[in-house]
Amino acid sequence: MISNRSRTILKVAAVAAASALLFTGCARGGTDGAASAADKKTGKGLVIGWSQRGISGSDWWKTLVEGGQAEAKKLGATIQLLDANGDTVRQNSDVQTLITKNVDVVIMNPNDPIGVGPSVSALQDAKIPLVTVNSSLDKSLVKNMYCYVAEDQGYTGSLAGVAAAKKALERFGDSGEIKIVGIGGFPGDVLSDLRFNGFMKGWDSVMKDHAGVTTKKLDMKYGAWKPDQALAPIRDVATANPDLKVVVSLSDVMEAGIEQGLQQAGIWGKGVIVAGYDGGMNAVKEMVQNPDGPLQATASNQPWDQGVAAVKMAVAAYNHDSKACPGGETFIKTTVVTPANAKDYYKPADTYVRANG
């Protein structure tokens, strides 16, 4: 028979053994956590908060996010996506939510370069690295982010400028006046200026060797980045300038409106060249189907690839890698699509060109 004292001793021993087992389990859990932290350095298990300024109504932004999600899945990372829907106050609230969720790093597509200042400060206080994509921060805030991911808009625009200039020489000869008009988003917006100035730099690099050609730039027109808003300005400028030779569309989103505007003005045909920006699959399809038509180039800014690059920079930011994003910005490699290579880039299932065609 086991005495009461012996039973008590056995119970104490059992509790001690259970406690030892529990402690061992906790220790094992701590080891697993350390391994998980090591995995995060490669992206596996990394939790990325993504604060997007907008998605609805924009295939470009949708493609940007999808590229990031595809790269995260490839690495084994998780993206917590919140859409501010064009509201800076809401975006600041979204970032606070991501901080509360204890994300490891944040990717932000800022709705307002200075209006998101509270978010930038909050992330800094929480010691959560920040990567921006597509749109950067105000100069006063840049020091508090790890990396800005985008395309070099001036360079990308120049690719279209070179292609358009070569086509203009082929169609119109190397003498005489060539009228050019650009159509962008809104008066004073930086994107329109960067892209158009880049286009002209590429154009001029070709035309400098053709002294017989005189380039006349007409005043910039604006279509609010929408096809219906682009129609009237292009129709009006083409009607007033029936000898218009080159239209620079600073976003392929406006392509349909530009085409209708030129048709209504009676100059849609081989007598005019249209060069676009964005690498929209609608523009690529037009060049595949009508290689001798007005549309002769689109410079591709590849939103999918920007999303991929943003996730890669998020991993680098988590690792405090000082070499991955020199100077605090990284530009993806962009390309230009023309009728000569349009078939290589045409992918009906995609909305925008990707780097690998």
Image (tube, helix red, strand yellow):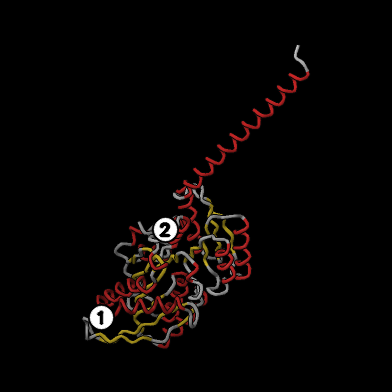
Q: Residues within 10 Å of mark 2 (few under 14, many from 20)?
A: few
Q: Secondary structure under badge 2?
A: loop
Q: Amino acid at mark 2?
A: Asp
Q: Secondary structure under badge 1?
A: helix
Residue under label 1, please give it: 207
From the top left corner, tell me how far across and down residue 120 is, in percent.
55, 68
As drawn, is 132 to the left or to the right of 210? right
Q: Is residue 90 above or below residue 315?
A: below
List the single residue furthest toward the right: 4
Which of these two is toward me, 79 or 211?
79
Which of these two is toward me, 11 or 130?
11
Q: Is residue 11 above or below residue 82?
A: above
Q: Which residue is painted at 49% across and 56% down in the image?
A: 66
| Cα–Cα span, label 2 and label 1 | 43 Å
Q: Which mark is residue 342?
A: none
Picture quadrant where residue 312 is located: bottom left
Which of these two is toward me, 26 or 173?
26
Label 2 vs label 1, nearer the camera: 2
From the top left corner, tell me how far across and down residue 259 is, in percent.
43, 74
Residue under label 2, please give it: 321
